[in-house]
Image (cartoon, rainbow, N blue to C red):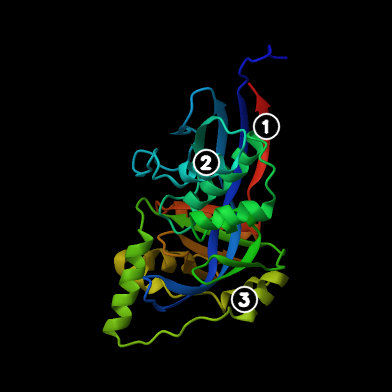
Amino acid sequence: MSAPGRFTARTVRVKAPGKVNVSLEVGPLRPDGYHSVASVYLAVSLYEEVAATSTETPGITISLSPASTVDLDAADIPLDGNNLAHKAAAIMADVSEHSTGVHLEITKRVPVAGGMGGGSADAAATLLACDALWNSGLSREELAHLAAELGADVPFSLLGGTAVGLGVGDELSPALAKAQTHWVLVTADYGLPTPEVYRTLDRLREAASANAAEPTGVDPKILTALRSGDAEALSRVLVNDLQRASIELAPALRDTLGIGESHGAIAGIVSGSGPTVALLTDDSVAAEGLAADLRHYGLTALAVHGPVPGARIISDTLL
């Protein structure tokens, strides 16, 4: 037991999942510069981890763990107030009566700028970690409101599972789809900035004189397939309006999709704004086999499953 008045550091470690967009329909450019979307999010078993440690020194600091599996030298990850996890900690400090200084150590496993919400997972994990660290006592609903201030994908990483996203992706409705589907994620050694992908989509639509409709909901067949875990049915209804724009910016994605489908994937899709490719398989054995085959081509391939739960505490330790 520490002496009265003596500072005792504590570390709360939280993991939060990345996601794939099983479907993503994108409306026309709005006057406010955004696009309305209708999407089905699936949280998958590739996790970011954030260890939040209280410090006597005020302020928020960030470091990246050497246990990270992404190439930290190649990834352009800010370690200041531009990092979404830093912003999450700052929001929590504002609403917590007993906040301290905090150091965030982030273990990166979700591809950076890969269309899988890795930065959003960091932010969700940070919200939950700081809530526990500072005994803020916020409900999940209150944390979700704070998450929405940080970005459209952050509330989903907090929630996990399967959800329908409308609006700009921030209007979330949990979907009762617990059956497992199995995927191979093929990650790239480069990122695609989301705003650039959306701009490219607008340009392609304008060039083709294509009028996009305002999305109002998702295809119920997608949710039916996810509820039953019917990969074959799901393969027929995968859609991503951003895929064409992502391939325009990174033509190699077309080759990755082709290689995946020629080696047993029953369908493939660019996840979100890319460049991560999600390949759907029949089961876990098929996913592991496909991932091994793709590695022979020099591709970085990971077998994952979903849905998985959202952000959750995995340890809470006094130092």
- List the single residue furthest toward the left: 207
* Residue 285 vs residue 167, the one in the foreground: 167
- Where is residue 258? Give x, y as percent: 42, 69
Q: Is residue 157 above or below residue 2?
A: below
- Where is residue 126? Give x, y as percent: 56, 42
Question: For residue 316, which numbered disc appears in the image?
Answer: 1
Q: Quadrant of residue 205?
A: bottom left
* Residue 126 vs residue 254, the one in the foreground: 126
Q: Residue at x 61, y 29 (%)?
A: 11
Q: Residue at x 44, y 43 (%)?
A: 70
Q: Is residue 282 visible?
A: no
Question: For residue 222, which numbered disc appears in the image?
Answer: 3
- Where is residue 104? Give x, y as percent: 51, 34
Q: Is residue 151 visible?
A: yes
Give the class, few, some or many, for how many residues have Cα within 10 Å of label 3's Cα (few <14, many ≥20). Answer: many
- Where is residue 276? Give x, y as percent: 44, 59
